[in-house]
Image (cartoon, rainbow, N blue to C red):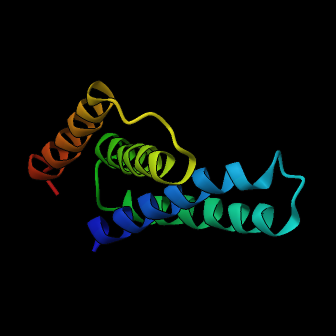
Amino acid sequence: MAWILLSLAGLFEIGWAIGLKYTQGFTVLVPSVLTLIAMTVSIVLLGLAVRDLPIGTAYAVWTGIGSVGTAILGIILFGDPATALRLACIAMIVAGIVGLKVFSPA
């Protein structure tokens, strides 16, 4: 259950990171409110997950999910560069997330 909560926390992290782009510096009401809600949900879910997972593992996976998801959506939604080297780096982050999951004591 902790891994499911952590995965959901990571998805909400992607949501708030992408949401920041739409808030225009927290000057647009609806995206700002949705981003703040996503931030809160993400942190609460992370907090619940770390009850059963090591903090270092949970935090690294949480930020990894957020980083990879945000980078991919940045490419898709905002035209961020999708160079081979950049995609290789994203793949290494994914490998790290998988490794942390596989070798986690929980």
**What is the x, y in percent for residue 44?**
55, 64
Residue furthest to the top in view is 85
Q: Residue at coordinates 44% horizontally, 63% vertically from top-left?
A: 11
**What is the x, y in percent for residue 14?**
50, 56
Q: Nearer the viewer, residue 48 or 74?
A: 74
Q: Residue at coordinates 41% horizontally, 68% vertically from top-left?
A: 8
Horizontal side, residue 89 vs residue 16: left or right: left
Horizontal side, residue 60 vs residue 100: left or right: right
Q: Residue at coordinates 9% horizontally, 51% vertically from top-left?
A: 102
Horizontal side, residue 3 vs residue 42: left or right: left
Q: Is residue 40 above or below residue 89?
A: below
Q: Is residue 81 above or below residue 51?
A: above
Q: Is residue 59 above or below residue 88?
A: below
Task: Please state, as top left, top right, bottom left or bottom right, where the C terminus lies in the image.
Answer: bottom left
How many numbered marks appear? 0
Q: Quadrant of residue 40?
A: bottom right
**What is the x, y in percent for residue 67?**
42, 43
Residue furthest to the bottom in view is 1
Residue furthest to the left in view is 103
Q: Residue at coordinates 18% horizontally, 44% vertically from top-left?
A: 100
Q: Quadrant of residue 36?
A: bottom right
Task: Please state, as top left, top right, bottom left or bottom right, where the N terminus lies in the image.
Answer: bottom left
**What is the x, y in percent for residue 83?**
33, 30
